[in-house]
Amino acid sequence: MRDTPVWIRMSARVIRALPFGRYRLMNLLCHRPIEAFIHLLDVTNAKMKFVCNSSDGIAREACFIGYYEPQETVLMRRLLRSGMCFVDVGANWGYFTLLGADLVGPTGRVISFEPHPTLYSLLQSNVSMNGLGCTTLPIALADSVGEMTLSGFDKHDGNWGVSQLLASPNSRRPQYQVQTGLLETLLDEAGIAEVDLLKIDIEGAEALVLPTITKGLSCARYKRILLELHPPALSERGTTGETLSRQLLDYGYQGWTIDHSPRAFKRAAYRFPLSPAEFLSPLDLSLSFGEWPHVLFLAPGIQPSW
């Protein structure tokens, strides 16, 4: 596969210097299909490489803007250190897997779960291309071991991160039968006793996973949990983000809300945050989560490091 075309490298430099209109120009340049290429993931110290498909919004941002989800990127860079263990649930093509592997280094552990066959293939390619020892599993974490139907994504709609285990029949998107598993069992099998950072972004299936890890929560197996909640999908499963968050609080975890308001996103997109303190606030379940809630939880005894 070819390296990044010169015109894309030059365009990225121009886009990153713009005081406004970065995303508009980026999307305009990618309006027509571009043959996939290998690009450097600039937020990694070791300059990890990834296969960039410009049809995917995450890959576009990583290429042209230099990073994806700046708040979560800053948090990971603050929370993970050499020798730690990072578990990426809903890894997609591996943006956070590569970042996590870079941060924990060769003495750390990274285990990533991604059930979508296309994304899993990209994840494997990116891990292999960088010579990483990450464990990647094509398993959808859920509340049972077996098979479930995964609703995929439309390769042309710009968002490859919407695959989800179906709570009800849906014929609008491609569907796949995928293997399901239990997080705690799989961690046991991998020989992982403690997880320094558990990241979960699985489009509503957090409602299936979180109730299965109570044993680990009770002994603070998961030191830090970075959780993206999906209110509409949770509603289909008869629960809410507040209910799931309260479960974690009941085990003594401390919660912080990550500000993902349009204003906060624009600020972070045009000026990479210097500290998580810029976008974190104590979790208050009496307030509405909003449309796209991201929450950080720290286990009992783990002190904030920002």
Image (cartoon, grey):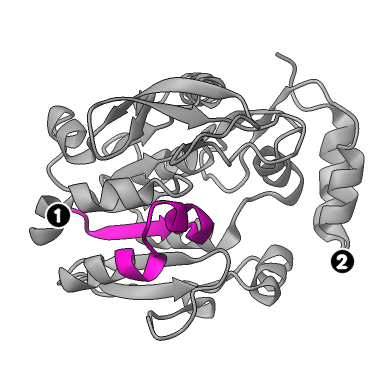
* Above or below, comparing residue 85 to residue 224 in the picture: above
- The residue that appears at 76% across and 32% down in the rendered structure is 55
Q: Which of 1 and 246 is in front in this view?
A: 246
Q: Which of 253 and 61 is in front in this view?
A: 253
Read off the magenta span: 221-244
Q: Which amino acid does label 1 sit on?
A: Thr
Using residue 303 as the reference point, say whether residue 263 is left or right of it. right
Q: Say whether residue 20 is magenta.
A: no
Quarter of the figure with residue 167? top left
User: Which type of secondary structure does the marked residue at label 2 adopt?
Assistant: loop
- The residue that appears at 71% across and 47% down in the rendered structure is 61
N-terminal of the two: label 1 or label 2? 2
Q: What residue type is labelled 2?
A: Phe
User: Which type of secondary structure does the marked residue at label 1 adopt?
Assistant: helix
Q: Position of residue 249 (x, y in %)?
A: 23, 72
Give the alpha-carbon distance from disc 1 to disc 2, as whole Å. Answer: 45 Å
Q: Where is residue 82 in the image (x, y as percent from the top left)?
A: 31, 47
> Which residue is tagged 2?
20
Residue 256, numbered circle:
none
- The residue that appears at 50% across and 21% down in the rendered structure is 176
Q: Is the residue under label 2 in contact with that under label 1 (CB below 8 Å)?
A: no
Q: Can residue 31 be seen in this view?
A: yes
- The residue that appears at 58% across and 48% down in the rendered structure is 43
Q: Say whether residue 240 is magenta.
A: yes
> Which residue is tagged 1?
214
Q: Is residue 76 visible?
A: no
